[in-house]
Image: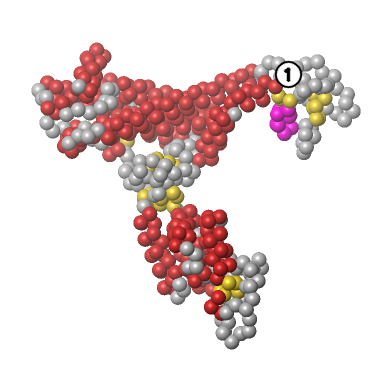
Amino acid sequence: MNLNNHLIPARERVQERSGGHLSVTISSKRRYIVLNVSDIKHRQSEQLSYVSFLFSVTKYEASVLLRHYKWNTTRLVDQWVHNEESVRNETGLFVVKSKISKENDVINCGICLEENLSVDEVMSATCDNHYYCKTCWRNYISTSINNNGPGCLSLRCPDPNCPAVVGQSIIRLVSRDDKQKYRNYLMRSYVEDKECLRWCPGQGCDRAIEFEHSGGTGGYDVECDCSHCFCWNCSEEPHRPVECKVVAKWVGKMRLEKEDFLCTNWIRTYTKPCPKCKRPIEKVSGCDNMICGVPCRHRFCWLCLNELRPDYRHTCNKNNAGKPKAEETQTNLTNQYYNKGWTQNNVLLQNAKRHLKISQNIKLPEPIRTQLEFVVEFWKLNVECRQVLKWSFVYGSMLLEDEDKKRQLLRSLQRKLEVGLECHYRCPVNGLSEELFIKGGTREAEFIKFREEITSYTTYNYGILELLVKALENGLCEPEPQPQLQPQSAANTKTSPRAFSVKKRWFSNCLFG
């Protein structure tokens, strides 16, 4: 049984319906590279070797220069060629012009104040002016490595008025474990200081993602080799097409509501916000003349929240806080709508991810796995749709009150995608089985036909998804496009609902045995 002619991966499919009103094209080109620890060390070593050779300095001195310029070789070379002395002064990498000789009288340690030390017992940073014994140097470096973390990479002369950087010969005084920690901090600085690199936030993952800033509109969603997906720009979960600053505001709001639910209810019940600074104020006893705390010091009436004049002439028997205003009620209902939509799609997203993982981990012979690749594509699209739907509710919650047309357009596209996903989700493709390919005859023809219907739903939903994403990326400013794409099972076939349901039950029995 060969179904290759019927298996078109959703991410490479181009569907054109009659009339040519809608064309869906998907590019699989990635704008990022996943780097493991070996790749990072190799790149770092090459960059250090290049700068060391170009400037005739040691690799340690090259690392000092590169870290100061955030591992930007181009910028470093430009500044070095323009004014080498200025670069050395900024980095504390001074040229040692003189050395102490053995003929000098006594040398005293500037930390422990030990006297009569020989030349071999003391060392100095690149300043060549402040000498300390090797024991004090060792303790100074080791303490910084173990207590200051990455700060040990920027060690300077212990003299508070000296900006000279600590030399490599001094770093070698510490133990083997401290040297390894220092090398690890240096390696991590290559990722943490470069603008185009980020660590993967996945649990136990030590890979980094290099992102190509090409100015495209594809967003920052990336997937590490550990299968963890996240936004490269803010390290949150993928949220295209919602901006990172909107996500940060929403995540902060949800975290506050989750952690301080009881506290928030208490504040709403027993306090009122200051009309000026909005800080919550509790009235314990006394009259209704309230004064907010420092630095606000706003004076207002507890009942009506109006400002009180300095002469205290104010009479009020009205409690405006007794009943919520109509505008506040409508605002609360709107917020509840978006919160509910976000929560529901988040639950469905986790469910889709679970099914995707199951379909990817089922062990099957390679020929059968290739034939059934449409099941993985089915759940990949489901995950992508739920992801966009989830964050589209966040986008809607940030719309202004006078943006009703945008809100209506957004809700229209959301409903279309939700309806398509309901049909999409009801398809019983939660598992795989070799039985589909062992038994031929009528079942083979039914399977092919049913598979075409699933492919049609997949294509239709992806078309609606693209419309929703483009509308959000354009700020919901354009009129809603009218797609001509329709699911094959509903538009191009004469399959009755009962027959369609029977075929779904048959397919489910085949998949689950």
Q: Which is nearer the eye, 331 or 216?
A: 331
Looking at the image, which residue sits at the far left? 441
Q: Quadrant of the N terminus?
A: top left
Q: Is residue 31 among what the camera can see?
A: yes
Q: Identify which residue, 328 or 192, lies in the foreground.
A: 192
Query: Does residue 484 appear to the left or right of 296 in the view shown?
Result: left
Q: Residue at x 23, y 23 (%)?
A: 512
Above or below 329: residue 80: below
Query: Where residue 372 appears, x then y in whole percent?
Result: 21, 32
Which portion, as a residue range, is magenta?
273-281
Q: Secondary structure at mark 1?
A: loop
Left or right of 63, for residue 371: left
In this view, the residue in front, 475 or 387, is 387
- Is residue 274 one of those drawn in magenta? yes
Q: Residue furthest bottom?
A: 103
Quick check: 56 above or below 64? below
Q: Amino acid at mark 1?
A: Asn
- Work out whether 159 lies above or below 23: below
Magenta-drawn stretch contains 13: no
Mark 1 = which residue? 320
Image point 49% across, 23% down: which residue?
340
In this view, the residue farthest toward the top is 498
